[in-house]
Amino acid sequence: MATVNIHDAKTHFSKLVERVAAGETVIIARAGTPVAQLTSLTDTTATGPQRLGFLADRITVPDDFNRRDEDEIAELFES
């Protein structure tokens, strides 16, 4: 994983994009402190794959969820 400063990243952006497209990850630093990461869009390791149901153990949906406030909603459509 290469680290480049902001000035070099701006100057050699096209070359950095080629490196990233080839599978490399590039860290962009400001005054030696990492501030950004340049990765390929096809690289799922950066954010991880999205998965459905990730809140299944943390929340519950009430049994009456689909009927909640149905009387109030019906009144909104009565004219």
Image (tube, helix red, strand yellow):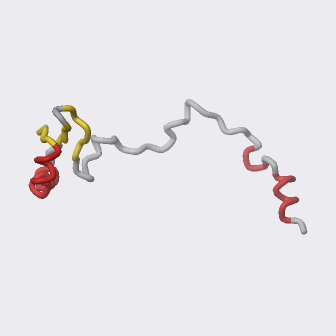
Whole-percent x, y for residue 63 in the image: 74, 40
Task: Decide which of 40, 30 is in the foreground and name it.
Answer: 30
Where residue 62 sits, quadrant-wise, is top right
Q: Residue at x 27, y 41 (%)?
A: 45
Whole-percent x, y for residue 53 in the image: 51, 41
In screen coordinates, is 72 left or right of 57? Answer: right
Image quarter where the N terminus lies is top left
In screen coordinates, is 51 left or right of 38? Answer: right
The answer to whether residue 76 is above or below residue 42 is below
Q: Residue at x 48, y 44 (%)?
A: 52
Where residue 32 sits, quadrant-wise, is top left
The answer to whether residue 30 is above or below residue 14 is above
In screen coordinates, is 7 left or right of 62? Answer: left
Which residue occupies the extreme right position in the image?
79
Image quarter where the C terminus lies is bottom right
Task: Decide which of 35, 31 is in the foreground and name it.
Answer: 31
Which residue occupies the extreme bottom position in the image?
79
The answer to whether residue 78 is above or below residue 67 is below
Task: Decide which of 33, 68 is in the foreground and name it.
Answer: 33
Task: Decide which of 53, 47 is in the foreground and name it.
Answer: 47
Q: Residue at x 14, y 41 (%)?
A: 5
**How many numbered marks, from 0 up?**
0
In screen coordinates, is 54 left or right of 41? Answer: right
Q: Residue at x 15, y 52 (%)?
A: 10
